[in-house]
Amino acid sequence: MQHTISFTHNNKQASVKIPTGALLSDAAHLAGIDIGQPCGGQGRCGRCAVQVMEGTVRRRSTLRLSPEDVEQGYALACQTVVEGDVAIYVPPQEKIERRLTTDRVVAEVTVPEEYEYLQDQTVRRIHLELTPPSMDDQTDDWARLQTAFRLQHRFENVTCSLNLLQKMGKILREGDWNVTAVVDVKNVIESYETDRPIRLLDLQPGMVDEYSPLWGTAIDIGTTTVTLWLVDMVNGQVKAQVAEYNGQIARGEDVISRIIYASKNGGGQDLRQRVLDSINSLLETACKRVNAKAENVVKATISGNSTMMHLLLGIPAENIRLSPFITAVNHPPILTARDIGLNTNPEASVDCLPGVASYVGADITAGVLSSGVNVMDEVTLFLDVGTNGETVLGNRDWLVTCACSAGPAFEGAGVVNGMRATQGAIEEVWINSDTLEPTYRVIGGGKPKGICGSGLIALLSEAFLTGILDKAGNVNLMAGSSRVREGAHGGEYVVAWGVESESGEDIVLSRVDVDNLLRAKAAIYAGFTVLAETVGISLEGVSKVLVGGSFGKYINVEKAVQIGLLPDMDWSRFEFLGNTSVKGAYYALLDWRKREQVTEIAKRMTYIELSADNSFYEAFTSALFLPHTDLSKFPSVVEALTSKVEDQTSE
Amino acid sequence: MIASAGLDMADERRLLDSPCNDIDETPEEHMPIEIPKDKWPGNIRSITIGATSAEGGTRAKAVTVGGGTTMPYLQFEAPTTNKPVIAIEIKSRKPDDWSPLLAEVWGEAMNDPAQWAKKAQEAGADLIVLALTVEDSVEDAVKVVKSVLSATGLPLIVWGPGQMEKDNELLVPISEAAKGEKLVLGICEDKNYRTIVATAMANGHLVQARAPMDVNLSKQLNILISDMGMPKDRILMDPTTGALGYGIEYGYSVMERLRLAALQGDAMTQFPMIVTPGFEAWKTKESKVGEGVPEAWGDWITRAIHWETITALSLVESGADIIVLRHPESVNRIKEAVEELITA
């Protein structure tokens, strides 16, 4: 019996006739409507959801759809059988993705609501009108400027660098004794005493528009990725966000190998220069993007792990590696860009955020600030999925933290075809379990260049669920597809053939990549489980899991659970925060009270050393499996695996 | 006794000071002491190796191992279900790297695996382990397995030479040629288990699953093998043996933990354990070398057999079910020791 299916898609109508028992996806295909089916029409991804406006259908599966969705008529086109005439609305793809319960997209950064430049910002731009000198008034330029500060703004103690002194006379006269000064008033704000020293950062002739941008930058120096945000400190807006691999990677992938390299002859200087080059090139890119000049950037707030901070500052770091693991400095004083070597305004105030210990640095204190773990009522778990997997557990009353070396795999480094989450990165993968053919999505939509962290998570999970990988990560060469083959380093799976890729070469997931990913996820999982055990909290008792990391702009939590990176709990408890370290640096850059909170957080955190006994190692080896040696910890994955087996047997 | 009895310091002093306190310390009869018994939710699987003609094979009898319901030899909790069995290791061709002491005791038989297997049976073996070598061709290997099978009625364990590709190349045809015999094929490791498991499944054999002295890794390999569809009564767990002085304490402790996990109900650790003290002990300098060693080491042959025996006995006590040995004297001693453990 034939039925009429009418579709509404992109404001267009189409209708087709199709017999009883056909699938809605077949009808759509017949009508020439392209409904995405990344999972190959197996009802696993939920991307083919459509809305049944009239008529009735039979849903074979509603996986991925909430009861409310079904109530509103949503149905998976690939799993829905035609039994009569129906009218179907095909929503735009973005709308569907927003509905999916599995996907967590990093929230866009917004200016903190309460931000008030004149109250919160330690760097100010102030306008000064000086009395021009004359034969009767023989006061020198510098004293004249100081007088103006005192009389017009009650700043009694202004200090100034030699560099500015050298330029001062010219600037004052150029502006006809009308100047705009940029000063760091931190000391005065914090103490409310006007005679505390304030530092002159910049002097410009004439009166600069009050609302024109006053540039600052928030920087996160990750072991693998350096991230820089360019911020207009007047309105607080982030005007440019840029990131690049840390140039130090060429000298070792983890902090330990960097420290060893730094302690060798000239190594420290080399590493310092490399990270400076990375930062300065990012600064240039960001400034170019918004038509700003790097020399107008007058404040920088830097976050990063303790080793990165030491290496940036050229401070010997070897004691971080040697027992009893003591840093040279956890809380550096405010420095100037000239001292450090940043290509901002040389007088710019550089604030390196405080860390806690050798392996819990400012990246974590900043992460706690931006994630808000420290103000939560209920026990919250904060995971930073970075090269050093750092974990914080706690709430407003207590905070414990630990760190473990996870490696850079989730940032796309140390993986043959890995890359950062930028243009050309495969960020999502589905594999059809019958044909083992993949469907992927590329950032920017062009040809794929490689795979970023979120893509690797999805790929690992799909390869596991479709039997390409066994639970130990071995590639099953008997899987029955030309995409599964023996590669240079053992078995591999071809995600994109050379003809599809940007470089013309196959994009693969190799056995070595799988091992690196497994180690990374196992370290992170072991870190937070051992931390929770140490303080006697079961993961069930954790109300929220906040995930930070640079693996992409989104994470599919279901996939992350399936590989055993995240604990198997209700997906609604996960939030993805993106790079929490740079976000924390951004808050601290804007608001001196937030900055004080970071110091407070650093003081409050209790560090748990995971190497103190062998419980971490135990937890690590048992997590070194897909999803975990103890399957009872992952009931949803067991279910996914069994339903897959049932599918196969029913066919 | 005093400190734990909830007395305060003053009480304590009074008791200590008084020359004859008034507590009657001479009970007429002994109180009956009840030894606490652990109740475990899980137990070790009973697994049978070898098939008689009634079961489709040609073995004179099958050997059943495992079945333990308590920690090893706690007879007051439950009698030992199946006592541990001894396998003697023979090679498909005369080894040139074995201790001269072993060559001495096995003599000419080492040149003929069938003869060797017979002698091993006479020496008290419950099973034979036949270890193949890289020099064996597929034809050689199948032939030697057949000749050993016809030489004795004991169940047979066959080890590949220990190189992934060669193992697979030899074990598949052997598995097919000995279909139905319920051999044990080994050794499966996490990087190379698929082929061996697949052929064992198809031909009704068992597999030996070896993981490097780690509870989690053992469990992981057992999961991988079960995931392929291998029935759980056809897997033996090899936790990897370290000889006395060469890591035995690690092996011991891992085996103890595997047993505890099994008794606690973890299905993926409930497999009987096979250990290889013969192979490991005879690798050590103490057993292999007779000359140029300190005098304090004593008589070579005594020392070498002690080394194998003590290694093996330690593993028996931590719950091993199949003990693979090399020297007949060690076989005698371990059999004796097991009897004592069971009847004690």
Image (cartoon, coloured by chain):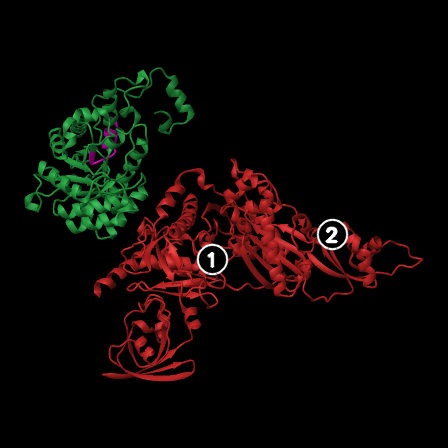
Chain colours: A red, B green
Are callouts 2 and 1 both on one chain? Answer: yes
Instruction: Specify whether residue A354 is in view.
Output: yes
Which percent across, then down, holds residue A363?
A: 54, 50
Which percent across, then down, holds residue B293?
A: 32, 19
Q: Quadrant of residue A77?
A: bottom left
Residue highlighted by disc 1: A419
Q: Quadrant of the C terminus of chain A?
A: bottom left
Q: Which residue is painted at 29% across and 55% down in the image?
A: A477
Q: Which residue is painted at 43% across and 80% down in the image?
A: A10
Q: In the figure, is residue A280 to the left or right of B15?
A: right
Mark 1 Cα-neighbour bin, 10 Å: few <14, some 14–19, many ≥20: many
Q: Nearer the viewer, residue A157 or A462?
A: A462
Which percent across, then down, holds residue A221?
A: 56, 51
Mark 2 Cα-neighbour bin, 10 Å: few <14, some 14–19, many ≥20: many
For the residues labelled 2 and 1, say whether their Cβ atoms are less than 8 Å apart. no
Q: Quadrant of the N terminus of chain A?
A: bottom left
Q: What's the amino acid at mark 2?
A: Ile
Q: Give the spatial CA distance, label 2 vs label 1.
A: 44 Å
Q: Quadrant of residue A316?
A: top right
Q: What's the amino acid at mark 1?
A: Met
Q: Quadrant of residue B111?
A: top left
Q: Disc 2 is attached to a residue of which chain?
A: A
- Magenta region, residue range: B310-323
Which SS class for mark 1?
A: loop
Does the segment drawn in magenta span residue A103? no
Q: Nearer the viewer, residue A497 or B125?
A: A497
Q: In the figure, is residue B104 to the left or right of A606?
A: left
State the mark number for residue A198: 2
Q: Disc 1 is attached to a residue of which chain?
A: A
Which SS class for mark 2?
A: strand
